Amino acid sequence: MILNALSITVIFIGVLSALLAIWGGILSFVLYRRWKRPFIPEEKASLEDRSYLVLLIMVIVLVIRLFDWPLFYVTLQSFISDIEGAMCIYGVTQVRPGLTRFLEFLKPVNFFLIGGWFLLHLLDRATKTSPLMKRKLLLLFILSLLVLIDSLGDIFLILGIAPESLVSCCTTVTDISNRPTRTTPLSIFGPEYAQSLRVLFFITHLALIGFIGLSLKFKIFRRPILGLLFLFAILNATFFLLSQVEVFAPAMMHLPFHHCLYCLWQYVPDSIVMYLLFILGTFSVGWGFTTELFGRHGDTVELLTVFFKKIYTFAFFFLSAFLIMLIIHLLVD
Amino acid sequence: MTLKKGWIVSFIIVVIVLAGFVWAIKKGASSDRCDYDGTRIEPLYAVYFFLQDGSEKKFCSVVCASMSFSALKKQIKVVRVADESSGAKIIASQAFFVESEVVTVPHIKNRIHAFAKKEDALNHLQKFKGRWIENPLDMSIK
């Protein structure tokens, strides 16, 4: 284990959130099971009190887990100097590649689900009758399981990264000619694939912003439309990833043959802000859809339009800000 | 109306701050980094491409240089490598190259060493179980 302030923080947060996730997960499942039965007023009051305590504590745990995603990468970054052969986070991920890859996949999933759950919680709290309480408890139980897996993963990973490990870094993987991010678009668009990717990304991104703007202007928040917007945001995210690796990251780093996104964060630190804007924008589109999917119930129906307006305004703002940052970078470069 | 104004003003402020941030970072960018993967260059293992247009490309190792070599070959006027014994820049075609157990740049596992003098190269070769190799940055190879 590499001992520094960040690794200790990650382990501390991991242990704490694992314990609280077990407690909160069991209790939320028990409360969910009891919630569906008809009960006498005293029983209901006691059930509500217990639910609010569980929700209060789990909200704190979930907020901490939201910040755990960036903390995870900051911690890996702090290990670079202790891993022989690592020049960026990619090198550190090669010490325990399987577990790190799993956590790198799980963390954004958790971030998305936690964000979606928070929106349901806010929506439910804005009503007088808490019509979403049962759904919230069930989703909280599922989230607790994911938080538990994530926390244990963090602990095992940090304990498992031995100092002085010898690894190869990104250059030997991200820059080889048969990397999938090159071969896939190459087979579709031909040798000029980079230009096609660049144009395609700008088209899909502008179209996504445009569709969100139209939804906001005409207040079209029907389920199929929001579902299509979410699917389009996923498609846009795919083009984002491909174009970043193949076109924009090398341009922003001034390294035309280097395609590592971890190196981009290192050499062009404001790209982290840029990526954060893109992630929040894309996730906001998804959160709008999950709110429609799980939040339409009883008293919430009247509040949904106001909620959607706020969520999609955020999405519009974040995606536009990302685009402006990217354009500024490309113009400066 | 006030809310809309607030949004526009905050949007402009954010953009200005971010633009300033980008500019500050560009200004502070380090010049002694490898032109292939951006890592810091250790002068003793550096490789330099002097291009036809008068510009220069620097690399942290022979491995990084050879990965850029094919793409830049038509633009290269001369290739120089650092002599590992003295640090002096020598023309690659006049250098002696040895591949040995010693890794100079760990992140790409560079084991190729360049020397100005044959004795130094031979000394390294015998000491670290090396072997002679051809110049990997040979301009004459098509």
Image (cartoon, rainbow, N blue to C red):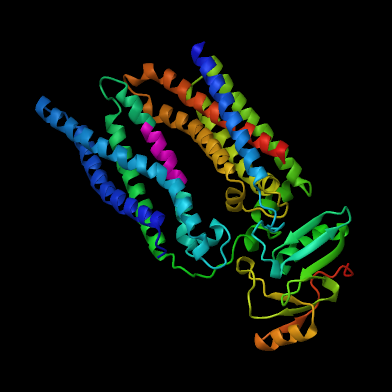
Could you tell whether B83 is left or right of A5 in the image?
right
What residue is rendered at 47% in x and 20% in y?
A309
Which residue appears farthest toward the top when viewing the image?
Answer: B1
Location of residue A173 with respect to A65 vertically, above or below = below
Could you tell whether B12 is left or right of A251 in the image?
left
**Percent of width and height locating residue A165:** 49, 69
Could you tell whether A58 is left or right of B79 in the image?
left
Location of residue A63 with respect to A258 vertically, above or below = above
**Percent of width and height locating residue A88:** 57, 57
Taking depth in this image into account, of A323 and B65 the one nearest to the observer is B65
The answer to whether residue A94 is seen in the rendering is no
User: In which image quadrant can residue A39 be found?
Assistant: top left
What residue is rendered at 64% in x and 59% in y?
B39
What residue is rendered at 78% in x and 58% in y?
B57
**Percent of width and height locating residue A168:** 58, 66
| Residue A115 forms part of the magenta stretch | yes
**Percent of width and height locating residue B61:** 70, 67
Which residue appears farthest toward the bottom when viewing the image?
Answer: B126
Taking depth in this image into account, of B24 and A34 the one nearest to the observer is B24
Q: What's the magenta bit mostly, secondary-structure-wise?
A: helix
The answer to whether residue A15 is seen in the rendering is yes
Q: Which residues are magenta?
A: A107-118
Taking depth in this image into account, of A306 and A69 the one nearest to the observer is A69
Location of residue A295 with respect to A78 vertically, above or below = above
Count up the numbered dots: 0
Image quadrant occupied by the C terminus of chain B: bottom right
What residue is rendered at 58% in x and 33% in y?
A232
